[in-house]
Amino acid sequence: MTAALLSIRNLTVRFHGERGETVAVDGVSFDLNAGETLAIVGESGSGKSVTMLAVMGLLAKAGVTADNIFGCGRNLLNAGDVEMRAIRGRQIGMIFQDPMTSLNPVLTIGRQLTEMFEIHLGLSGAASRKGAIDLLNLVGVPSAGTRLKDYPHQFSGGMRQRVMIAMAVACKPQILIADEPTTALDVTIQAQILEILSGLQSEFGMAMIMISHDLGVVAGIADRMLVMHSGRIVEQGLVDDVFANPQMPYTRSLLAAVPRFDLETEMTP
Ligand SMILES: Nc1ncnc2c1ncn2[C@@H]1O[C@H](COP(=O)(O)OP(=O)(O)O)[C@@H](O)[C@H]1O
Ligand SMILES: [Mg+2]
């Protein structure tokens, strides 16, 4: 038995606003094992993004409580800002839901990519430039060498998503967190992005957490899934088992909205 790469116990996240307290995540516990793809599904507002932002140390500490957040061999719950910054990017890569939070509009793509190598891996000059070109090639950005001097707004949505994936995997992290990585894209581009993610995962041996409200995406890519509803995990299991035999009415209602062409039972009378 190997220990989980990421282990979260009883995570709760509260926000205080004008209308009082919101419990966005309410006692969530789960593990991520080496090499696996875990999907977190659930409707908008169910707490998927906030769960992972809390794990990454990107929320105000005061609102986050847990019995344990253990990741990459460390106690992340008590890690300081400097330690968390080193872990983010280097050991845990994240593709954020909002593309514009991860790409800086006033820096060229090349600058942003080479910065990843410089900060985390200590590379410079030609080595980091070569690393940036290799990465863009890997995620399928054409003419990578000449595009390094372009700014984010000069890339299409699909190309921008490829750049964000490149940045997230630049340091070959152990864990990649992808928050709705295909939601804003049209269907053909979605399929290409999912293929790139699967390819990178097998190439680098990363574990992946795929956040999605789209169960079609989950069916194609994930091994295991958690279903979130109102800040709680209401169901979890192997994707095949949950799809074949959902236990909770909420999960059944989510599944009812998804066309499935790969269930033979549906095709046989
Ligand atoms: N910064 C914030 N301040 C207050 N409430 C927030 C904040 N971020 C998220 N929330 C609330 O937390 C809940 C969960 O949000 P989120 O995790 O983003 O949902 P999703 O499952 O769609 O990713 C929602 O009710 C959302 O409105
Ligand atoms: Mg979200």
Image (cartoon, helix red, strand yellow):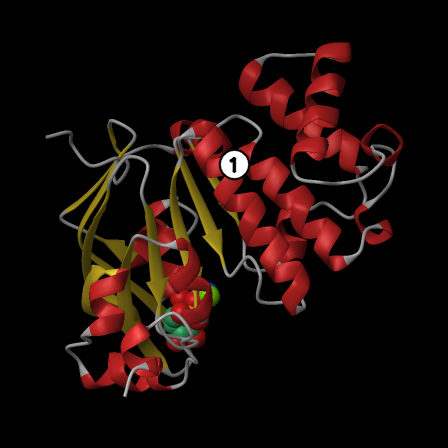
Q: Is residue 85 visible?
A: no
Q: Is residue 260 left or right of residue 89?
A: left
Along the line of sight, which residue is nearer the eye, 24 or 207?
207
Report the residue marked by disc 1. 200
Q: Is residue 172 left or right of residue 29?
A: right
Q: Residue at x 42, y 54 (%)?
A: 221
Q: Residue at x 37, y 64 (%)?
A: 48
Q: Residue at x 80, y 56 (%)?
A: 156
Residue 216, picture quadrant? bottom left
Q: Is residue 45 left or right of residue 130?
A: left
Residue 36 location (% of width, % of height)? 31, 42
Q: Eyeballing the image, is 210 above or below 168? A: below
Residue 38 location (% of width, % of height)? 32, 52
Task: Locate the C terminus and report the quarter of the image it occupies.
Answer: bottom left
Q: Is residue 118 left or right of residue 80?
A: right
Task: Locate the N terminus and report the quarter of the image it occupies.
Answer: top left
Q: Eyeballing the image, is 117 above or below 159? A: above
Beta carbon of the mark 1 residue lies under 8 A of ligand 2: no
Q: Badge 1, how many Cα within 10 Å: few under 14, some, many 20+?
A: some
Q: Residue at x 32, y 36 (%)?
A: 35
Q: Amino acid at mark 1?
A: Leu
Along the line of sight, which residue is nearer the eye, 63 or 263?
263
- State the SS at label 1: helix
Residue 64 location (% of width, % of height)? 28, 55
